[in-house]
Image (cartoon, grey):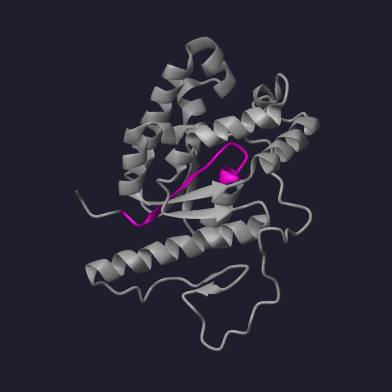
């Protein structure tokens, strides 16, 4: 196996975990490029994702998704937002692990359902509505998420987004990236003197000397209100 590429960040997670918005924020902070595999698929197929599923089927979509991932993986200093089901293929999981730091954005089923409802009420996205069709959509989301959960374990770092703002989630992603870089460098005997400092809701990485204790900390049931909202983007 070749050396792991630490100059890319791949965001994985269920639909409406915030991958696209967080990815753009992370890329802006790091001065990196941002890409979304769903956007790459739409550009390649020249039609929206719902039409790809309806007219060509899921198998064709998954092949386009695989090719989109193959195309972006050789890049450097890129933040890549991926589709919610990209982790189902072992080939995709292996490729992301080899090509960058994989960060999973987590959200509880009720959070995902709430974000979907907000987006649906805006009437700005036709992509989210299939998840809302039929009885008890929240339960359906929970079941699908439970099925995919073992595959999300491929992540090097996981951020629970329910109780954090967009900026806080972005900071936690960068914190994870810095942590994984340090761990890899220790294994390989390399230094990380050029690592940027990432400020998060709870601390900074690498630590800043004489840093004062942050005023706000978030526990499992101490969520700021409102939660950050996802803007018309299903992944």
Asked if residue 17 is among those painted magenta in the image, a careful observer would answer yes
Left or right relative to 165: residue 143:
left
Q: Where is residue 177 in the image (x, y as percent from the top left)?
A: 44, 60
Q: Residue furthest bottom?
A: 210
Percent x, y for residue 188?
23, 67
Residue stretch rendered in magenta on the structure: 5-20
User: With respect to residue 189, does 235 lie above or below?
Assistant: above
Relative to 184, 44 lies left or right: right
Residue 31 visible in image:
yes
Nearest the camera: 136 or 130?
A: 136
**Residue in front for this viewpoint, 87 or 96:** 87
Which residue is found at the position 42% from the left and 18% from the top? Answer: 59
Image location of residue 173, percent across then percent down = 52, 58
**202 versus 104 height, above or below:** below
The C terminus sits in image quarter? top right
Residue 224 colored magenta?
no
Q: Measured along the vertical axis of the image, is residue 136 above or below residue 229?
A: above
Residue at (70% x, 76% y) in the render: 215
Q: In which quarter of the image is residue 62?
A: top left
Q: Is residue 30 visible?
A: no
Q: Residue at x 63, y 61 (%)?
A: 168
Residue closest to the far top: 55
Q: Using the image as rendered, state which of residue 189 and residue 113 is in the foreground.
A: 113
- The residue sitting at 60% across, 71% down in the picture is 202
Q: Is residue 37 above or below residue 190?
A: above
Instruction: Please give the count of numbered marks on the rendered protein.
Output: 0
Left or right: where 45 falls relative to 115: left
């Amino acid at each position: 196996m070749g050396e792991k590429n630490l100059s890319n960040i791949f965001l994985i997670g269920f639909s409406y975990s915030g991958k696209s918005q967080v990815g753009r924020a992370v890329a802006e902070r790091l001065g990196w490029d941002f890409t979304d595999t769903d956007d790459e698929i739409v550009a390649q197929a020249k039609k929206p994702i719902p039409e790809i599923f309806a007219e060509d089927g899921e198998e064709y979509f998954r092949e386009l998704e695989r090719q989109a991932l193959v195309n972006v993986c050789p890049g450097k200093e890129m933040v890549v937002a991926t589709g919610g089901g990209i982790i189902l293929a072992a080939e995709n999981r292996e490729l992301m692990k080899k090509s960058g730091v994989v960060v999973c954005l987590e959200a509880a089923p009720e959070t995902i359902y709430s974000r979907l409802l907000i987006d649906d009420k805006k009437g700005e996205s036709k992509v989210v509505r299939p998840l809302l069709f039929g009885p008890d959509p929240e339960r359906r989301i929970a079941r699908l998420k439970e099925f995919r959960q073992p595959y999300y374990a491929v992540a090097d770092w996981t951020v629970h987004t329910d109780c954090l703002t967009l900026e806080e989630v972005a900071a936690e992603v960068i914190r994870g990236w810095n942590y994984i870089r340090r761990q890899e460098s220790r294994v390989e005997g390399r230094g990380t003197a050029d690592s940027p400092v990432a400020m998060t809701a709870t601390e900074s990485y690498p630590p800043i000397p004489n840093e004062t204790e942050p005023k706000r900390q978030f526990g499992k049931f101490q969520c700021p209100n409102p939660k950050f909202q996802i803007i018309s983007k299903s992944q």
